Image (spheres, rainbow, N blue to C red):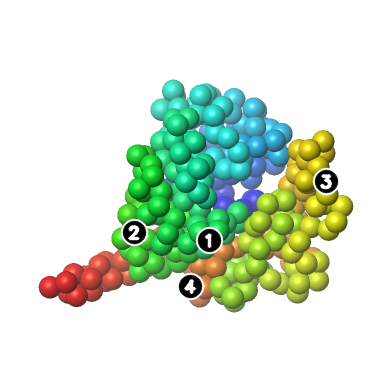
Amino acid sequence: MAKLVSNNKMLIEAAKSGITGCIPALNFRTIEDFEVGLKDLKDNCPGAWGVNLIVNKSNILLDKHLALLEKYPPHYIITSLGSPEETIRRLRPLGVKILCDVVDIEYAKKVEGLGADAVIAVNSGAGGHAGKIPASILVPMLKEACKIPVLSAGGVGTGKGLLSVMALGADGISIGSPFIATEECGVSKEYKEAIVNFGAKDIVMSTKVSGSPCTVINTPYVQKIGTEQNVVESFLNKNKQFKKYAKALTFYKGMKALEKAAFSATYQTVWCAGPSIEFSHKVETIANIVERWAKEYDEAYQELIKLHQ
């Protein structure tokens, strides 16, 4: 999930609950912390776990991340915002599954050709860097175009929602925002309360966080600063000579803002989340969420069976 939201404890509890968790490499403050975190997961996580990698030039630590992932291979990697070619070349031979975030057919076919094991269809209901196409169209579209598994990311916050997306043909579901409001999550009390108290109507797109469209909660501070880059930022991000430096700077500034918001309650708050927070009504454990969704899924499935009898 977003910068510094997910942690090792969440991945361990997820595995105990029968699901799998993934943590961004950039959630660790230093390369040394990243190595400690990987070793901890290797030693203590009772099930599958993964690492999210940003694979474009904004991640200046990518080569060091890959070196440590070669030393402590996770079960899978989720790549985003760039080409996964180097990640596939270095980690897939070690048995690491490579899943790639995609938003359209063109990129899905490209990563399939590079050797990706699956694609994650990031739809318009996703939190963070969302796509533009709804799951009802994107999932069947990619299932028809690709020979590798298609997972869906975005818009699921209930067991019924889980069933509906699986019925589209998805081979799995990636869920993030609802798990921010959990006891295991290490963000501030205020961030968790925001997940509970705000809803789908309060989610807006902002390019100020990373330079790419990203979903955030429309707090008074977000309303004040706006959701679009200023003239200078926009120029630098479009200029070929300065683009890679501008994107790196925007990403760094945005991540620092998210880090500050995640762990402290201030007026200058930028909280990243997706519209699935609509269904988060209290702070609870990961195990409770998984148990509730499993029950809702089974009930919805039985209702479907009755309708077709």
Q: Earlier in the sequence, mark 1 or mark 4?
A: 1
Instruction: Identify the amino acid type marked 1.
Output: Ser
Q: Nearer the viewer, residue 72 or 202?
A: 202
Q: Secondary structure at mark 4?
A: helix
Pointer 1: what residue?
124
Q: Give coordinates of residue 280: x percent, y percent.
A: 50, 71
Considering only order in the chain, which callout, 3 or 1, is on the residue closer to the N terminus? Answer: 1
Residues packed near mark 1 inside 10 Å, few (<14), some (14 to 19) or many (20 plus): many
Q: Secondary structure at mark 1?
A: loop
Measuring 62% from the left and 74% from the top, which residue is drawn there? 202
Q: In this view of the protein, which residue sits in the foreground, 8 or 165? A: 165
Is 169 left, or right, of 57 in this rendering?
left
Relative to residue 276, is residue 167 drawn left or right?
Answer: left
The residue identified by callout 3 is 236
Disc on res. 273: none
Is label 3 in contact with label 2 (beta carbons under 8 Å)? no
Which residue is labeled 4 in the image? 279
Q: Which residue is mark 2?
A: 168
Give the distance between the C-alpha atoms of the residues marked 3 and 4, in whole angstroms: 39 Å
Q: x, y percentage for residue 13?
A: 45, 52
Q: Amino acid at mark 2?
A: Leu
